Image: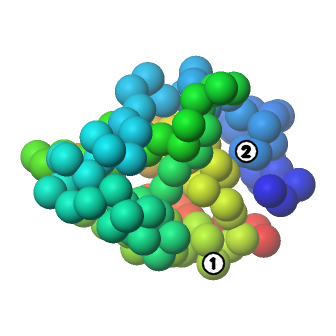
Amino acid sequence: MSERSEPATPGTSDVPLAERDLAALVTEWLDWGQVAALLGVTPAKVRTMIREHELAAAVPRPGAGPCVPADFFQDGLIVKGLPGLLTLLHDHRFDDRECIAWLFTDDDLPGRPIDALRENRGSEVKRRAQVLEY
């Protein structure tokens, strides 16, 4: 995980993304088997999708296995624009945990980036992500 923190902007927590409490940020998680069933693919395909940044996974709390936020899905599909946004964040050297923390942190969009994606307002989220510092 990187040691970078977010730029200092109004509403931004002083806690670096990598250290944020994901269990507090994300209310519902799916394990890889649940994701596979939802998408009609195998758990191995889910692993590939995570590796290729179509999805992001993290361990939400100690003792849990890797999971994917349930809000990454809408109507049985991956939320429109999420894979491209995850690739952009990874290009900015975010790891999956930091991507999830950024997507679920309520800064000045208004609201959380994941909510904007789910409401088909992905262009404003991508603009925000493009100006993040390395």
**Helix, strand, or loop for circle 1?**
helix
Badge 1 crowding class, 10 Å Cα cut-off, few under 14, some 14 to 19, many 20 or more, is: few
Q: Quadrant of residue 4?
A: bottom right
For label 1, the residue is 91
Seen at 15% across and 57% down, the residue is 40
Residue 104 visible: yes
Q: Considering the image in quadrants, where does the C terminus appear? A: bottom right
Seen at 54% across and 62% down, the residue is 128
Instruction: Answer above or below: position of 118 versus 126.
Output: above
For label 2, the residue is 17
* Image coordinates for residue 107, horizontal then vertical, percent: 58, 39
Which amino acid, mark 1?
Answer: Asp
Instruction: Answer above or below: position of 109 versus 105.
Output: below
* Image coordinates for residue 100, horizontal then vertical, percent: 55, 47
**Helix, strand, or loop for circle 2?**
helix
Seen at 34% across and 56% down, the residue is 43
For the residue pair 127 and 36, the one nearer the viewer reads as 36
Seen at 51% across and 50% down, the residue is 57
For the residue pair 109 and 85, the one nearer the viewer reads as 85
Q: Earlier in the sequence, mark 2 or mark 1?
A: 2
For the residue pair 61 and 129, the one nearer the viewer reads as 61
Which amino acid, mark 2?
Answer: Leu
Q: How far apart, in angstroms, are the residues tagged by discs 2 and 1? A: 16 Å
Q: Considering the image in quadrants, where does the N terminus appear? A: bottom right
